[in-house]
Image (cartoon, rainbow, N blue to C red):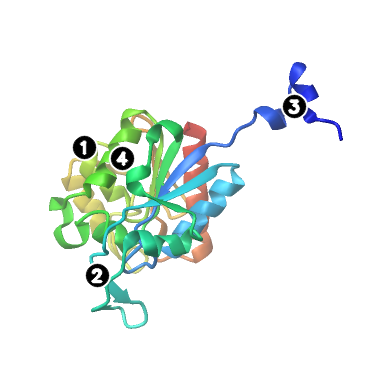
Amino acid sequence: MHSNLGFLGGNIPALFVTMGKRVAVVLAGCGVYDGSEIHESSAVLVHLSREGAQAEVYAPNVDQMHVVDHVKGQPTQEKRNVLVESARIARGNIKDLTKLDVKGLDALIIPGGFGVAKNLSTWATQGKNCTVSKEVEDVLKAFHAAKKPIGLCCISPVLAAKIFPGCELTVGHDTECEKWPYAKTAETVKELGCKHINKHVTEVHVDVKNKLVTTSAFMCNAPIHEIYDGIGKMIKEVIRLA
């Protein structure tokens, strides 16, 4: 059997030198009402794979704010752990968020879902007066300080609004209607001193200064393929900036 090492002495084939970007994906549980939105999380992982990037999945090792019965839409008495639940989406290949080291990573993605507003922050109960989990805030600030791109979709852009005053982002549209049932979020983001840019669900906004890429995803009452396409554009822009 001939060794491929012989190629290393001359013109090295692209196969040997092309390295995919390493992208941290931070989850907040499993399920739209109390964790990460599963379709958004899956779309993120699929589009990262399509772009040749290596996803590294993390979640905080903390209890969920509560557990919601996704049939009834009501809280239950059950207790669940964010890391353990997020592992369902990651097929078990997941690390505690405290183990994340920004030095070895090229970008950060946080999908949406109510878990962002309940487990990664207190946005669900306190709105603009919320606090962001220290672990999550530290990670966001580390990527920002290193000038590495951050992709946020659905409700997760509110984390940036809270941590990076004056940043530009989108959570969709700012006028509430059947298509945009969560449009008041845009007004709250503005109250935090950020610039909100109205975008359709298949569009993204890129804040070049802050290397922040956002898209509305399920903030819009849209067909699932449009959610998927918008997340795909977010991933493309994040990889381009990485």
> Can residue 208 be seen in the rendering of this structure?
yes
Q: Position of residue 178 (x, y in %)?
A: 34, 69
Residue designated by label 3: 13
Q: Residue at x 35, y 35 (%)?
A: 143
Q: Position of residue 177 (x, y in %)?
A: 31, 66
Precedes in sequence: disc 1 or disc 3: 3
Q: Label 1 neighbourhood size at 10 Å, few (<14), some (14-19), many (20+)?
A: some
Residue designated by label 4: 140
As shown in the figure, which amino acid type bears the numbered disc 4?
A: Leu
Precedes in sequence: disc 2 or disc 3: 3
> Are dots 2 and 3 in contact, CB under 8 Å?
no
Q: Secondary structure at mark 3?
A: loop
> Are dots 4 and 1 in contact, CB under 8 Å?
no
Rendered view: 188 above or below 18 = below
Residue designated by label 2: 66
> Are dots 2 and 1 in contact, CB under 8 Å?
no
As shown in the figure, which amino acid type bears the numbered disc 2?
A: His
Q: Nearer the viewer, residue 170 or 9?
A: 9
Q: Give residue 168's quadrant in the image.
A: top left
Q: Secondary structure at mark 4?
A: helix
Q: Label 4 neighbourhood size at 10 Å, few (<14), some (14-19), many (20+)?
A: many
Residue designated by label 1: 165
As shown in the figure, which amino acid type bears the numbered disc 3?
A: Pro
Q: How far apart are the two marked residues, 4 and 2, measured between alpha carbons?
A: 24 Å
Q: Secondary structure at mark 2?
A: loop
Q: Position of residue 206 (x, y in %)?
A: 40, 38
Q: How far apart are the two marked residues, 2 and 3, measured between alpha carbons?
A: 52 Å
As shown in the figure, which amino acid type bears the numbered disc 1?
A: Pro
31 to the left or right of 44: left
Precedes in sequence: disc 3 or disc 4: 3
